[in-house]
């Protein structure tokens, strides 16, 4: 009686921790929870009740578990042929498809149950987020195989996760324009240049049609560099209009200049020198850059007086 539940919990734990913290789904889910926290801060100005924060993060965490556990379960057979994705729990055999689908159902139930205790707007955004994740992975629609939909769904998911945070405060502030702009740039340039760049062959096998498959790596890096400039200039010039404090542009400019310092030497390299190791390193630096930008926006939303 006790052994079966313990085996199930043990299998579920691999979804978050296998093979390392850096390579687990926990990293991706953490960023979605960070976006929700950003939405909370933008809507509240930093005046938050702990119970609201816990509920909002819990809703997003559970909804993300639903989406990614479902995706891993559906794609398990295809992921076995990938040198990277084959290390995930389900294709590696550490968790069965059935266990993965069950984890997905549990995530959906927890997320919906928590959102019901908040408000109708939150419920709406949570349902939209989960439906989008379902349509992304599950045949026959399977949006990830549609032209440019892999990037479009990810961008939309990041925006909705932020709206979920704001919805818990029953307010959608105009200042969300800045994170929305950043998410569009992230999904359309940073991710194709650094994340999808090492996944082109696997995406081709899965029938996806992504930006990384259309443009060469040098062009993707040029677009990513342009996006850094757009992010830095837009936030610096408009933070006052959106009632953000001075911390926001300072952090943005500092992190952007550091990222550009790394990108410029890459742009000078010939196309054939972009090895997988270099792209992996660039991807990690891009994640740090993204994390700092989000932190800058979060601290920038706080009232300093």
Image: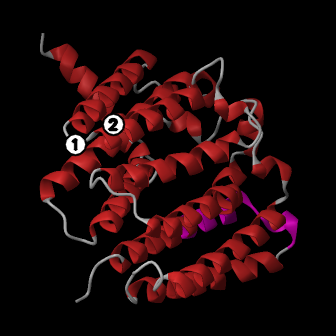
Rendering coords of residue 261 (x, y %): 64, 85
Secondary structure of the residue carrying numbered label 2: helix
In this view, 151 is above or below 290 = above
Kindly state the secondary structure of the residue where label 1 is placed: loop
Is label 2 in contact with label 1 (beta carbons under 8 Å)? yes
- Does 230 sit left or right of 101 as displayed? right
Disc sitting over residue 123 in the figure? 2
- Comparing 175 with 160, the one in front is 175
Residue at left offset 35%, top offset 67%: 42
- Left or right: residue 10 versus residue 231 is left
x%, y% of residue 305?
22, 89
Comes first in the chain, label 2 or label 1? 1
Dividing the picture into quadrants, the one containing residue 260 is bottom right
Residue 97 in the image: above or below residue 61: above
Q: Residue at x 38, y 26 (%)?
A: 104
Residue 266 percent coordinates (x, y):
75, 76
Residue for badge 1: 118
Secondary structure mostly seen in magenta is helix
Camera-nearest residue between 81 and 135: 135
Neighbour tally class for label 2: few under 14, some 14-19, many 20 plus, Cα within 10 Å: many
For image coordinates 39% across by 87% down, the residue present is 247
Asked whether residue 11 is in view, the answer is: no
* Quarter assignment of residue 270: bottom right
Q: CA distance from mark 2 to mark 1?
A: 8 Å
Residue 32 falls within the magenta-colored stretch: no
Q: Residue 280 colored magenta?
A: yes
Query: Which part of the image, by quadrant, shows the N terminus?
Result: top left
The answer to whether residue 62 is left or right of residue 251 is left
Are there few (<14), some (14-19), or many (20+) residues within 10 Å of tag 1?
some
The part of the chain drawn in magenta is 270-285
Residue 228 x/y as whole percent: 64, 76
Residue 22 can be seen in this image: yes
């Amino acid at each position: 009686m006790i052994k079966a539940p313990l085996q199930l919990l043990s299998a579920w734990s691999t979804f978050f921790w296998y093979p390392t913290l850096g390579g687990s789904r926990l990293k991706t889910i953490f960023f979605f929870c960070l976006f929700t926290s950003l939405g909370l801060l933008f809507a509240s100005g930093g005046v938050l009740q702990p119970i609201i924060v816990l509920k909002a993060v819990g809703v997003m965490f559970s909804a993300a578990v639903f989406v990614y556990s479902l995706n891993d379960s559906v794609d398990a057979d295809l992921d076995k042929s990938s040198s990277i994705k084959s290390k995930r729990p389900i294709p590696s055999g550490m968790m069965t498809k059935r266990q993965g689908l069950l984890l997905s159902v549990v995530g959906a139930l927890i997320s919906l149950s928590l959102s019901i205790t908040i408000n109708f707007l939150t419920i709406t955004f949570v349902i939209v987020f989960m439906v989008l994740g379902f349509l992304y992975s599950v045949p026959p629609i399977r949006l990830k195989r549609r032209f440019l939909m892999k990037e479009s769904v990810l961008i939309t998911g990041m925006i909705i996760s932020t709206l979920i945070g704001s919805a818990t405060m029953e307010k959608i502030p105009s200042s969300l324009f800045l994170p929305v702009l950043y998410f569009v740039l992230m999904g359309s340039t940073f991710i194709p240049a650094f994340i999808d760049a090492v996944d082109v062959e696997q995406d081709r096998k899965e029938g996806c049609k992504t930006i990384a498959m259309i443009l060469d790596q040098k062009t993707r890096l040029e677009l990513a560099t342009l996006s850094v400039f757009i992010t830095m200039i837009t936030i610096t010039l408009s933070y006052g209009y959106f009632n953000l404090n001075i911390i926001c542009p300072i952090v943005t400019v500092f992190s952007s200049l550091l990222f550009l310092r790394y990108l410029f030497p890459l742009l000078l390299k010939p196309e054939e020198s972009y090895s997988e190791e270099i792209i992996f390193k660039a991807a990690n630096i891009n994640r740090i850059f993204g994390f700092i930008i989000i932190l800058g926006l979060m601290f920038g939303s706080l009232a300093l007086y």
